[in-house]
Image: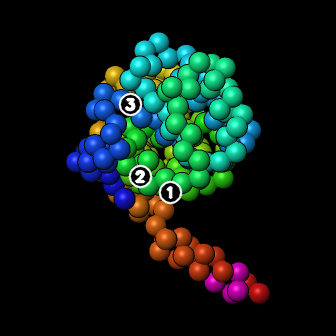
Amino acid sequence: DFISAEKKKEARLAAQIPDDQFILLSVGNCCQVKNHQMILEAVHLMEHKETLHYIHVGDNDDEEKVLAEQLGISQHITFAGTANPDKYLSVADCYVMPSLREGLSISAIEAITCGLPVILTDVPGLRDFQKGDFDQVYYIPLSAGALKNQIRKLMAEKPENSRKQSRQAKELYSAEKSVNMYMNLYGKHERSR
């Protein structure tokens, strides 16, 4: 559901997150195809990272913890492990998914539905969100530099969550619409027999 500015402020206050912190969020298990190391590299490249914090929700993050340590950015990262992402979505300023390829990502749909600014790599699967014409979904090439630039731009602009984007996502990806699509598909299949 849409996360209003008031709801976000309450959640950040409860989590003791300062107003000036810019929170990046990613959700998903750590594996090569998820490409979370690109987020770590982008954080490392940021010139002024004292107000930037990256939260990763998911497991199998040992390699990423080592990389964060090697890059000297551990203090800017929270590895939350396996957890319900809702509390993290409510405090986030931006959702990031730098996958090398992806199916229809439920976590990206959740972030888009919350109205969050969302940064996606321009790859098969994630590219499918372009048909939604969402006002705060940004596509970047597979490059830590491009990700750094988009994060820096969002940190400067500080956009509020988009109610319009949330409404559009609910219409496009509702459970009711999905069930109807499957019923129509199966109905056509049965009639063609």
Q: Is residue 36 left or right of residue 178?
A: right
Q: Image quadrant of residue 146?
A: top right
Q: Earlier in the sequence, mark 3 or mark 2?
A: 3
Residue nearest the observer in this picture, 122 or 40: 40
What residue type is disc 2 on? Lys
| Colour mapping used in the image | rainbow
Residue at horizontal 54%, vertical 54%?
83
Q: Which residue is mark 3?
A: 22
Q: From this viewpoint, is residue 178 visible?
A: yes
Residue at horizontal 67%, vertical 20%?
70
Tell me if residue 31 is in the magenta stretch.
Answer: no
Q: Does residue 76 sit above or below 47 in this rendering?
A: below
Residue 35 appears at what percent x and percent y? 67, 35
Q: Which of the two marks, 1 or 3, is nearer to us in this view?
A: 1
What residue type is disc 3 on? Phe
Cα separation between marks 1 and 3: 20 Å
On-image quarter of the C terminus: bottom right
Cα separation between marks 3 and 2: 16 Å
Magenta-drawn segment: 187-191
Q: Would you say the residues marked 3 and 2 are in contact, meaning their CB atoms lie under 8 Å apart?
A: no
Q: Which residue is mark 2?
A: 87
Residue 111 appears at what percent x and percent y? 45, 49
Q: Earlier in the sequence, mark 1 or mark 3?
A: 3
Q: Would you say the residues marked 1 and 2 are in contact, meaning their CB atoms lie under 8 Å apart?
A: yes
Q: Which residue is mark 1?
A: 84
Residue 38 appears at what percent x and percent y? 63, 28
Residue nearest the observer in this picture, 163 or 66: 66
Residue at horizontal 63%, vertical 23%?
69
On-image quarter of the N terminus: bottom left
What residue type is disc 1 on? Asn
Cα separation between marks 1 and 2: 7 Å
